[in-house]
Image: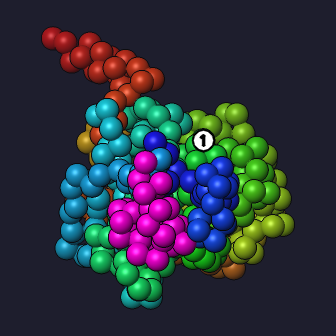
Amino acid sequence: MQNLLDLDGDSLTSWFAAQGEKPFRARQVLRWIHRSGVADFDAMTDIAKSLREKLKVKAVVRPPTVVSDKLSDDGTRKFLIDVGNGNAVETVFIPEEDRGTLCVSTQAGCALDCAFCSTGKQGFNRNLTVAEIIGQVWQANKALGAVHGDERLISNVVLMGMGEPLANFENSVAALKLMLDDNAYGLSRRRVTVSTSGLVPVMDRLREECPVALAVSLHAPNDRLRDELVPINQKYPLAELMAACRRYLEKAPRDFITFEYVMLDGINDSDAHARELLALVRTVPCKFNLIPFNPFPGSPFKRSPAERVRRFADILMQAGIVTTTRKTRGDDIDAACGQLAGQVLDRTRRTAAKTIILKEETRP
Ligand code: SAH
Ligand code: SF4
C-alpha cells in the first residue's frame, strides 16, 4: 500500500502515471488531501468512482496520530504526535496578530547533541518519513479547523522542532515542496524556514534543490566556545559556516540569514561576545534572533537576565543589525524552544551511558 502522504507533487504525478492515470488526476487528489484535509477516497467527490475504487486497493492517506493536544495560557498549542514503536514528536502552533507559525519536527530525537538542547539530550532514534513531517501540518490544520476553504491559519512553517532538518534532507525537502505547492499548502518560500545547526555541505544542497528562508543556530562567536556548545562545529567551523551562509544568500528567497543565539548566563552573553559576533558576521547580511535559554530538567545552564539580553541586543543594533528577542511562548506546557522532548527511544546509547554515569556519581 502506498501512503499518498509520503509523496510530493512530482512523485504523486509519477505514481499516478504508473497506474495509467493523467497528471491532472494527481493534482485533484493532492488538493483533496492537503487543501481539504480529506483522507477518505470516497469523500473525493469529483474523482471518478472507478479511480476511487482503484485508489482504495492500492493506496491510503495515513497521517501520524495526534496523541495529545495542549493549549497554553498564551494561545500556543502543542501537539504530541505518535510516530510508532514508542516514539513521539512534538509540533507547536504559535498564533500571533499578523501570522500563525507552525513549528515542525523532522527527526525522533537528534544525534547532534548540542549542550543546551533537550531534544539533543534524549539521543536519536530515526528520521521522520515525509508522511510524518507533512502529516504534522495536515493534523494541525485539521485541529485548528483550517480545512475546507482557504482559511490560512498556518501562514508560516519553521522546521525548528525536534531534530536537525538537514540531517534528514530528502524527506525534509519533499515535505517543504508540499508546503510550497499551490495544490497543497501554497506557502511562499519566504514564509517557510529551515533552521540548521550548520551542516555546511547540505546547506549548499538546500540552496540548489529547494531554497527557502534559512535560520542558522550560531550560539557562539568563536570556535572554541562553539565547539563546546554545538559539537558539529568541530566538523564545520565558523569560517566555513560563514562562507556557506554567503553562498546560500546568492539564491535565497530572502536577502538575509537569521542567526539564532541562545542566551546562556555567564557563558556566551557578555559585551565582549557581542562585539566578537559583530566581527564574525561582518560579511554576512543577517538578522539576529536572541533566544533566552529555556531550562529543562537536568540542564546545567541558566537563562541570561533580561537586562543582559537587552544590553547584548543593543550592541548588535547599534552596529546596524536588526535584532529581536524571542518571546518565550508556551513554556507552561513545555512547548518553548529547546523544551520539546516528545518521547524518543534512544538508539545511540547516549542516554543509557549518561544514566550509568549519574548513578555512579550519586553512589554513597
Ligand atoms: N536542529 C535545528 C532545529 C531545531 S532546534 C537547529 O539546531 O537549528 C531549534 C532552535 O532552538 C535552535 O536554534 C536551537 O539552538 C534552539 N534551542 C535548543 N535548545 C534550546 C533551549 N534549551 N533554550 C532555547 N533555545 C534552544
Ligand atoms: Fe539537534 Fe538542533 Fe537540538 Fe542541536 S539544537 S541537538 S541540532 S535539535
Q: Amino acid at mark 1?
A: Ala
The dominant secondary structure in magenta is: helix
Give the percent coordinates (x, y) of residue 172. 58, 52
Q: Nearer the viewer, residue 314 or 150?
A: 150
Question: Within 10 Å of the Cα at label 1, are there few (<14), some (14-19), or many (20+) other Cα atoms?
Answer: some
Of residues 64 and 202, the one nearer the viewer is 64
Identity of the residue drawn at 26% across and 13% down: 360
334 in relation to 254, above or below: above
Residue 68, by quadrant, is bottom left
Q: Position of residue 126 (x, y in %)?
A: 47, 34
Left or right: residue 172 compared with residue 120? right
Residue 95 in sight here: no
Q: Quadrant of the C terminus?
A: top left
Q: Answer left or right for 364 relative to 277.
A: left
Q: Is mark 1 within 8 Å of ligand 2?
A: yes
User: Which residue lies at the image location 65% right of the left edge and 39% below the top edge?
Assistant: 233
Going by the picture, which residue comes out furthest to the front?
A: 50
Taking the image as shown, residue 110 lies to the left or right of residue 67, namely right
Secondary structure under badge 1? helix
Residue 328 placement (x, y as % from top left) = 35, 67
Residue at image coords 47%, 55%: 55
- Image coordinates of residue 257 in percent, x first then y, are 68, 66
The structure's colour scheme is rainbow
Does the segment drawn in magenta span residue 42? yes
The stretch of residues the image draws in magenta is: 28-57
Residue 359 in view here: yes
At 34% from the left edge and 20% from the top edge, which residue is drawn?
Answer: 352
Along the viewing direction, whichever of 25 and 98 lies nearer the viewer: 25
Place residue 61 in its image quadrant.
bottom left
Q: Is residue 267 above or below residue 303?
A: above
- Tag 1 residue: 167
